[in-house]
Image (cartoon, rainbow, N blue to C red):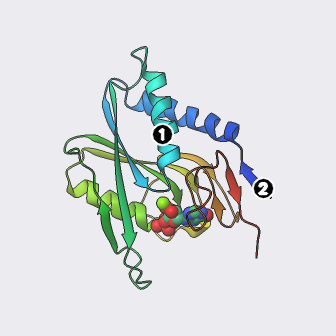
Amino acid sequence: MSQTHRVLLSEDDILEKIEGIATQICEDYRGQEVILVGILKGAFVFLSDLAREIEHQSQDGKGVSACFVEFMSISSYGDSRKPGDIRIELDVRQSVRGQNVIIVEDVADSLETLYRVRQILSEKGAAEIRVAVLLEKPEGHKRSDVSLDYVCFRIENAGFVYGYGMDVAEKSRALPFVAVADPE
Ligand code: IMP
Ligand code: MG
């Protein structure tokens, strides 16, 4: 039997928003190089659509001069008393020193992950660091020192979402839309 999913955000909704933030990025960094740093695994689909849209919009010389793609993978130590404590499982390979970096993340919930990733990239000497997220969950925020520069969707009380890169116990990452889990 095929699975049914409750679609929260359709493919078309998502691609329309990505087009919009790609336009903003192309305007903000016109004629400059940017390095997109995707946070694995959740951001892999979002990053691939965003990177292609940026390249597409930059073809006629109006957008960025180059769009590089890097990835980081991090995991938490699992100590709930220190939510910001994370281990780098995979680091960027290209130097970010003096570069414009855009962290690309699936969900901004507590903001602890983005805070730590931002700190790591800053220590590596990035010139400017911005953040692009597919989904912001404002009620989950636990910090006020992380700004989200490019946000596709702000979702309130949606519960757990999956698809479009995000998993449920490693399943359903490749769904082309964002689905919402049924409430318990
Ligand atoms: P935080 O902002 O440090 O709390 O971490 C956000 C991370 O939690 C994201 O990168 C996601 O991997 C994960 N996350 C939070 N909410 C969801 C969800 O609804 N679905 C899938 N992953 C989620
Ligand atoms: Mg994630």
- Left or right, 153 with respect to 67, comes to right
Mark 2 crowdedness (10 Å alpha carbons): few <14, some 14-19, many ≥20: few
Frontmost of labels 2 and 1 is 2
| Ligand 1 is within 8 Å of the C-beta of the residue at disc 2 | no
The relative height of residue 96 versus residue 124 in the rendered view (above or below) is above
Q: Secondary structure at mark 1?
A: helix
* Quadrant in which residue 88 is drawn: bottom left
- What is the tally of numbered marks visible in this picture? 2
Mark 2 residue type: Ser
Q: Position of residue 172 (x, y in %)?
A: 62, 57
The residue beneath circle 2 is: 2
Amino acid type assigned to the residue bearing label 1 in the image: Ser
Q: Is the C-beta separation of discs 2 and 1 under 8 Å?
A: no
Q: Position of residue 175 (x, y in %)?
A: 64, 49
Which residue is pictured at 37% across the width and 64% down the height? 74
Q: Is residue 76 left or right of residue 22?
A: left
Image quarter of the N terminus: bottom right
Image coordinates for residue 140, horizontal then vertical, percent: 57, 69
Asked if disc 1 is less than 8 Å from ligand 2, the answer is: no
Q: Is residue 145 visible?
A: no
Q: Nearer the viewer, residue 97 or 164?
A: 164
Q: Which residue has dot 1 on it?
A: 48
Residue sticking out furthest to the top: 60
The quadrant the C terminus occupies is bottom right
Please provide percent x and percent y for residue 8. 73, 52
- Of residues 43 and 22, the one drawn nearer to the viewer in this rendering: 43
The correct choice, above or below, for 183 with respect to 155 in the image is below
